[in-house]
Amino acid sequence: MEYSSLLDQCNLEDPDLLEGISLKAISNIGGLHPLLGLHDHIMVAVPRDSIISIPDHDSTNRIGASFETPCGRMLIKPADYMEMISSMRPNLWATLADEVPAWVSEKRNKASVERTLKWLDECITSNSEGSSSVALTEGAVLGSIVGGSRVEQRQSCAQEVARRNVEGFWIGGFGLGESMEERNPLLNAVMDSLPEEKPRLISGLGLPGKMLLSLIQLDLLVFSTEEVLQGVAAGVDLFDSTYIYDLTLGGFALTFPLESIEKQVTKYQPNSNSGCDGTKINLKATLYRKDTSPIVDDCKCYTCQNHTKAYINHLLNVHEMLAHILLEMHNTHHFLGFFRSIREAIHQGNFQQFRQKFIGNRHEHLFSAALSV
C-alpha cells in the first residue's frame, strides 16, 4: 500500500457542504467526484474532522454519534450516515464511530467500543441490503477501530473489526490527549491484531487546529512529522493531511531536506524570530522581509519557482488570502516529497535509520535554538 497524503478526505463532522446542498442533489449529480470536478482523485469519507480538537463525545449515545455543525448539534444515526455515504459515493468510507478522548472513564471507553462495533454491523448490513433511502455504494468499506487510551480495548476492538467483511481499517481516537509515548503500545495493540494485506488509515496524528490559538503550542507543530514516522513504523499505510492545514494557518513553510536526510539545513539557523527548527520556518518573521530567495532552493513547486520569501512575508503581514494559497501549495508539495522519501527508505530497507536521522536532525536544531536564547 502506498504511503500518501494525496487522498481527498471527506470529514463528516463538518457538514457545511451537506447543509448547502441536499443529499439528493449530490446523488443526482453523481456524487462528490463530479460535483467537485475531481474525477481522477480518490475520495475517502471518515466520520471525523481532525481539525476539530475533541469530538462531541458527551452528547453521543447508543442511537448515534453527535456532531457540532453551524446549524447546531446533530445526532447522526447509522441509517443517516449511510444515506450520506451513498449520496457522496466515495472510493473508501469508514463506518460510523464513537470516538472518545484519552481521559474518559473505563465505562465510557468500553461503551464507545461496543457502539462502534454495533454501528459497524449496521452500516455493513445497510450497504449490503440497500433500502428505499440508501442505495448500495461501490466504495470499499473501512472498519472503524476505537478504544481510547486502553490497550485491552484497542486490541479487542481491532480483533472484532478484523473478523468483519471489510476491505480495510480506519483507526480513530488518536490525537485526543495521549502523548507519543502512550500512543506506541496502543498502536502496536491495534496493528498486531490486523491482517497485513489490508490497508490501515489513521486520523488525528498532529496538532489539532484549534490549539494553534495558543502561541505556546505553536512550536509543537513539528511533532506531526515525527508522528507520521511513528505511525509508519507501527504499520500505518495512510494518513490524513490536516498537518498542512495547521502549518499553513500558522504561516509556516516546510524546509527539511528531502533528497538526503543526512544534509543539514544550515542557511536558516534557528532563532527567536524565525521559528525555524530544522523542519520549518515562520515566514511571518521580520527575518524574511527582504529575503528574495525561494522557500527552498531547487524546489519544483509553483510557489518556489515563482515567488520569494519576502513576497510571502508581505502577503502574510497584510493578511492576503494568497499567502495561504502559496504556502499550502509549497507545503503540500514538500510533504508529499517526505512520503516519497519514506517509501524509498522502506524499499531500501533502511527506514529505521531514516527515522533516527530525521528526528536527530530536528533535535539538534532545537538544542541549538535553546542555547541561543
Image (cartoon, rainbow, N blue to C red):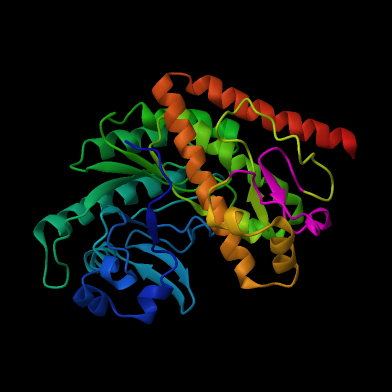
148 versus 342 height, above or below: below
- Residue in the foreground of this view, choosing between 202 and 38: 38
Q: Residue 346 falls in which quadrant of the image?
A: top left
Q: Position of residue 225 (x, y in %)?
A: 57, 39
Residue situated in front as seen by the camera: 54 or 284: 284
Residue 351: % across, % down: 48, 23
The span shown in magenta is 275-298
- Residue at image position (26%, 63%) is 85
Side of 56 relative to 131 (left or right) = right
Which residue shows up at 36% across the image and 53% down it?
Answer: 97
Q: Is residue 246 visible?
A: no
Residue 118 percent across, percent down from the top left: 27, 51
Which residue corresponds to the image point at 66% horizontal and 50% vertical from the top-left?
Answer: 295
Q: Residue at x 56, y 51 (%)?
A: 331
Depth order, front residue of 49/264: 264
Of all residues, the one furthest to the right in this rendering is 373
For residue 142, above or below residue 250: above
Which picture quadrant has residue 238? Answer: top left
| Image coords of residue 261 (percent x, y) | 59, 28
**Horizontal side of residue 285 vs 194, given as left or right:** right
Which secondary structure dominates the residues rendered in magenta?
loop
Residue 130 seen in render: yes
Whether residue 235 appears in magenta in the rendering, the answer is no
366 sits to left or right of 59? right
Of 31 and 189, nearer the camera is: 31
Q: Quadrant of the C terminus?
A: top right
> Vertical placement of 142 versus 9: above or below?
above
Q: How many marks?
A: 0
In the rendered image, which quarter contains the N terminus? top left
